[in-house]
Amino acid sequence: MPRIEQDPNIEVIPNFDSEVFKAVFQPLVTEDKTLEDIIADTKKAWEEEHQRKVEQWEQQEELDRMERAEREKKKPKLKAFVPHKVVATITAPRAPQYAINKLRNLDIPEMYYFTQEGCEEARLQDRTTSSSAMTLTQGEDGLMLTLAVAHKPSAKVIPDHLLSYRQMMIAKTGLLAAMSNELVWPRAVITALASLFLEMDNHSLRREVHGEEALVIYMVEVRREWHEQLKSADENVQPFNISVVNEERIQRIYRDILNTKQAAVIARSVTRFP
């Protein structure tokens, strides 16, 4: 239907009883249709058409309101600044956009992206011309142009199990902060993961040789398994509580590490003294 440009509610019915209209209608009078009949039919036709236009106008206004609301939601917004809040003394480390995008999709990025090295790489990447390259990606409203670096993993990434304990604990701070900023992650999930890191930080194995290495491997394994269960579409899968530490598993990992180290020492000794 053609768009109505003027509100029909302000329209007023013409005075079809006036002498001007009677003169127009007079040639239409017949034995079966009096002048009064013609005037009555004209009034009825006008009112029906007017009502149709009013209903169309209301539908049109409702659609306009919905479109305005949708545009308002998509329109970039700026927060109001706090007048007396001073700029931070240092720049907070920022993880690469690639890692943030994985979190938004409820995936788990490598912890490397939240280490000092990973954040420094992201900072340097932001300053290079290559970071302006664009690529087509699928968004909610169809294909859209986004920065290519936001979808490209780092060539320098270190697998989680090869990170040092110190790197892991530095990275967990950035990871938990990033998860908190992305509303897709339930608060209970973030709290449970934070509890795991706290348990590891207070574990007695930290005082033992190769103990921290065992704790890193434990964290990597259980976080991967936990995430797989959290995202599982199988209704029979019931995710465990990652904050509850399995001490037996930690000790098994620790023994495996010690046995491997011992075997390596023996192998070197045999090679040196045949």
Image (tube, rainbow, N blue to C red):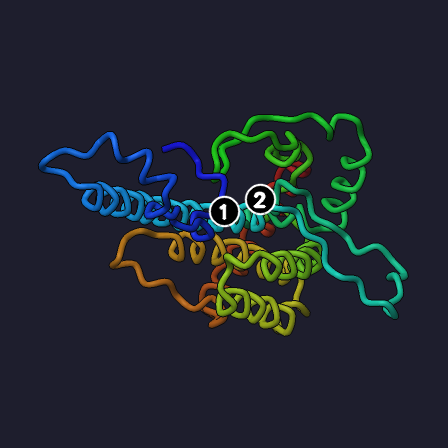
Q: Residue 39: x, y in percent?
A: 25, 44
* Viewer-closest of 270 and 119: 119
Q: Is residue 29 left or right of residue 136?
A: left
**Whether residue 219 can be seen here:** yes
Which residue lies at the image location 33% right of the left edge and 36% below the top edge? 23
Q: Residue at x 14, y 38 (%)?
A: 33
Which residue is painted at 55% across and 50% down in the image?
A: 103
Q: Nearer the viewer, residue 138 or 240?
A: 138
Q: Quadrant of the C terminus?
A: top right
Viewer-nearest residue: 7 or 146: 7
Dot 1 falls on a residue whose secondary structure is: loop
Give the label on residue 21, or none.
none
Measuring from the top left, give residue 128's x and y in whole percent. 80, 30
Q: Is residue 14 left or right of residue 31?
A: right
Which residue is at the front of the view, 44 or 29?
29
Q: Of the residues shown, which amino acid type is indicated by label 2? A: Asn
Residue corresponding to mark 2: 101
Q: Which mark is residue 105?
A: 1
Identified by mark 1, the residue type is Asn
- Measuring from the top left, give residue 15's x and y in whole percent: 38, 48
- Tell me if 20 is positioned left or right of 170 in this view: left
Q: Quadrant of residue 30?
A: top left
* Residue 266 visible in the displayed image: no
Quarter of the image with the N terminus is top left
What residue is at 80 percent from the left and 62 percent from the top?
81
**Image position of 253 with respect to 149: above or below:** below
- Residue 146 position (above or below residue 212): above
Question: SS at mark 2?
Answer: helix
